[in-house]
Amino acid sequence: MNAITRRVDRSKAPGDGPAEHEDFFLGECMATSESEHSKIPINLLRNNIQDRATTVAQMLLGLLSDARLRHFFDSDDRIGSHIESPLLLVQAITDWIDSDHTEALNLGDEDRHYQSLKDPYRAKNAPFDSVAELQLVHGMSDGLYDILRDHVTIYNDNPAIELSTAPLERILYWGLPAALKDGLAPEALLPGMPVLARKLATVRSLGAMVPMTLSTLQQIITQSGMGQIIDSQKLGRVFSDSSSTTWYTLVAEGRMNHATRRIRAVFQASEGQFYYVRID
């Protein structure tokens, strides 16, 4: 993520000469850009290519299995309900966009969760049109949505995480769990995670001198003593050396005194077109 912050000061008193930046208001602004190619493409859960759907499901499961999120699956939300496990929530998201009306795990009617609500509706059975639509999915509490919305996307159609643009937390906490050998749970990563995190941070700090590539990641995994638990073929599906980012989320915020204006937009660079703009 790239960020730019600018402060503008018009504190010069009248008569002291022309104020610098006199065409600006007193205040500050900040802008950030983030690649959509480093996020989880949730619409691929509906993909007919099973490897892609499985990879995305494993990424979501790795993210949601973070111990810090455990309370969302143990306690009721503000409307008095909760979903029992990360696996069931991943399945609920899949059921929302797949083409049938049957629950993937329980073989029951997937609409039953929605028809029992005060204002009933049905599962969409079509791709997400926005990330905000996740709030309609069974088991998606406000707290979980606030976390997920910054890590998922509807714009990217490739499940592989771009190593050149992905934050380290995404590589560590939902990329690597999806690359574990069959039969291993995310907890298998815990013993080697501190060493791996330090080595990755060191490489990332070197920037262009040591680019973050799939080969570099594989070497760091081996040096961290985790080579025996990572499937190299899965690693190649989960991560990509590509740096051809074309989708970006742009966020700009300006503040003056007690007033704040925020703009969020999604930009397609190769087309030079905005696909989403919201001003608050």
Image: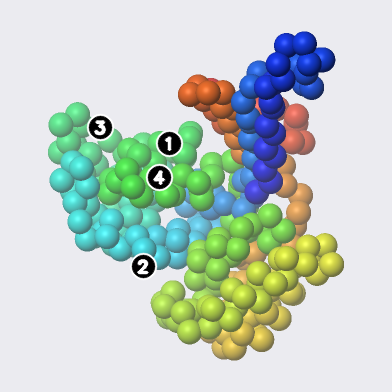
In this picture, residue 113 sits left or right of residue 57: left
Q: Which residue is mark 2?
A: 67
Q: Which numbered mark, 2 or 3, is in the foreground of this view?
A: 2
Q: Amino acid at mark 1?
A: Ala
Does residue 99 appear anywhere in the picture? no
Mark closer to the chain start, 4 or 2: 2
Q: Secondary structure at mark 2?
A: helix
Residue shown at 64%/57% (left/top)?
A: 166
Q: Identity of the amino acid at label 2?
A: Ala
Earlier residue among tags 2 and 3: 2
Tag 3–tag 1 contact (CB < 8 Å): no
Frontmost of labels 4 and 3 is: 4
Q: In this rendering, which labeled residue sits more in front, label 3 or label 1?
A: 1
What residue did someone put label 1 on?
132
Mark 3, Cα crowd under 10 Å, few <14 / some 14-19 / many 20+, is: some
Q: Position of residue 41 (x, y in %)?
A: 54, 49
Q: CA distance from mark 2 to mark 3?
A: 32 Å
Of residues 54 and 84, the one drawn nearer to the viewer in this rendering? 84
- Which of the 4 image quadrants contains residue 15? top right
Residue 99: image x %, image y %? 40, 44
Q: Earlier in the sequence, mark 1 or mark 4?
A: 1
Callout 1 crowding tier (Cα within 10 Å): few <14, some 14–19, many ≥20: few
Are there few (<14), some (14-19), or many (20+) residues within 10 Å of tag 2? few
What kind of element bears circle 4? helix
Q: Give the residue pinned by disc 4.
A: 146
Q: Which mark is residue 190?
A: none
The residue wearing badge 3 is 121
Query: Amino acid type of disc 3?
Result: Tyr
